Amino acid sequence: MRIIMFLVLALIVSSCNDKKANDASNVVKAGEENMIEVANTDLEVYDFNGFQKFLQKKDDKVYVVNFWATWCAPCVKEMPYFEKLNQEYKEDNVEVLFVSLDFPHLYESKLKPFIKDKNIKSKVVALNDVDMNTWIPKVNEKWSGSIPATIIYKNDTSKFYEQSFTYESLETELKQFLK
């Protein structure tokens, strides 16, 4: 499985380089915080430097950060569990963030329609940084790069999961942070 994910991630790199993700017709600005605004959309697209702030919040909230892609069947299968978790624990100061690793040239044709069709209520951002060898170990040094992958953290305490979840297993992991 890890070899397959490595090959898929290698395809992402080559696809991102070939598809001119930073073509002026698609990108209106690159801000100081390394966020790329895609024309005619509210999808936030970040390079890793801009995205990193989502992994470092220290405000006593529990963050559940899930790395996924529309082409990843296990990722899509578990998304309703994260959505349910976000709804059921919102009052307990829990926030779910979906981090899409979809190909940039498919944001309009695949990612945004998926978000709309599945009625995703949790925040979704796209991570567009082809230098995976640099940013994957910054997320977690043990991460092979395969997805789905999830980080649950509160302030300085975090746990990394390179696996799929059922709702029950996800809720069990979350409850460790609510004590």
Image (tube, rainbow, N blue to C red):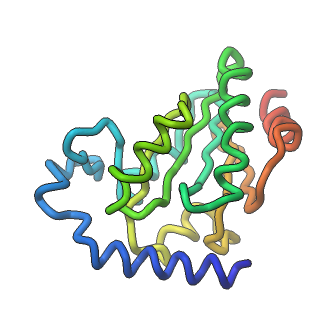
Q: Is residue 159 left or right of residue 126?
A: right
Compare residues 129 and 122 and report the one nearer the observer: 122
Percent x, y for residue 49?
Answer: 38, 57
Q: Considering only vertical position in the picture, is 4 above or below 147?
A: below
Q: What residue is at 79 percent from the left and 28 percent from the top? A: 178
Percent x, y for residue 104?
Answer: 35, 61
Q: Quadrant of the N terminus?
A: bottom right
- Which quadrant would residue 161 be assigned to in this image? bottom right
Instruction: Name, please, the residue furthest toward the left.
Output: 24
Q: What residue is at 56 percent from the left and 61 percent from the top? A: 71
Percent x, y for residue 95?
Answer: 61, 30
Q: What residue is at 41 percent from the left and 77 percent from the top? A: 13
Q: Is residue 53 left or right of residue 42?
A: right
Compare residues 116 and 139 and report the one nearer the observer: 116
- Which quadrant would residue 5 be assigned to in this image? bottom right
Q: What residue is at 49 percent from the left and 44 percent from the top? A: 114
Q: Is residue 173 left or right of residue 125?
A: right
